[in-house]
Image (cartoon, rainbow, N blue to C red):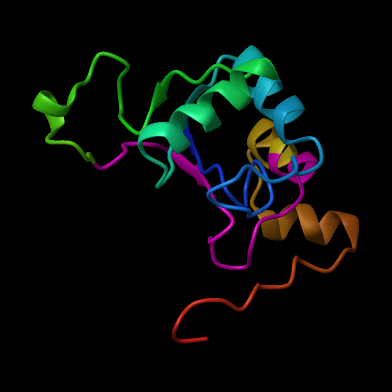
Amino acid sequence: MIIAVDFDGTIVEHKYPEIGNERPFATYTLRKLIEDRHRLILWTVRRGKELQEAVDWCMERGVEFYAVNRNFPEETVETHGGYSKINAELFIDDCNLGGIPDWGKIYQMINEGKSWKEIYAESNEEKPAKKKKGWFW
C-alpha cells in the first residue's frame, strides 16, 4: 500500500518551524509499516532547510521514506512542476476529519484492513476528539 504521512502534528507534535516531540510510537509504527513492505511518502508543507531537518530527524530514528513530497524518488521539479498531487491509497494526517488516532490504532487499521469506526467499536473507547483549529471552526 502507498501511504502518505504528514510530519508536523502527526509524527511529531506541532512546533513548526522547530521539530516537536515525537508522538508516542510514531517512528516505531512507521518502521513496522516499512518492514511490512508498505511504501511511505513523507507528505509535508515543509520545504528547504525545514524539510531536510524533518527528513534527517526521521532517518536518525530509522525511518527512510520511499519518497518525500513526490510520488517517486526520481521525480524532480522539472518532471512535476515543484508540487505534485500525491497518489496514495492512505493519508495519515492530524488534519483528517476526527483528528488522528494513536499510532497503535493506526497500525491496527492498516494491518487488519479495518476502519477507525470498527477499531474503536471493538475497543469500547471514545474516538479522538476533533481539534478545533482553522478559520471556520
Residue 15 coordinates in the image, percent (x, y): 63, 53
For the residue pair 129 and 60, the one nearer the viewer reads as 60
- State the residue at coordinates (52%, 86%): 137
Residue 103: where, in percent of width, then height?
A: 74, 42
Was residue 60 drawn as part of the magenta stretch in this picture? no
Q: Assign the magenta stretch its main secondary structure.
A: loop
Q: Which residues make up the magenta segment?
A: 85-106
Is 44 on the left or on the right of 115, as rendered?
left
**Is residue 20 visible in the rendered structure shown here?**
yes
Is 80 rendered above or below residue 45?
above
- Is residue 36 visible in the rendered image? The answer is no
Q: Residue sitting at 55 percent across and 67 percent down?
A: 97
Answer with the quarter of the image where residue 14 lies.
bottom right
Q: Nearer the viewer, residue 8 or 119?
A: 8
From this view, report whether residue 97 is shown above or below residue 19: below
- Does the magenta portion include 86? yes
Specify whether 29 is left or right of 55. right
Location of residue 105 (image quadrant):
top right
Above or below residue 107? Residue 136 is below
**Left/right of residue 117 with respect to residue 70 in the rendered view:** right
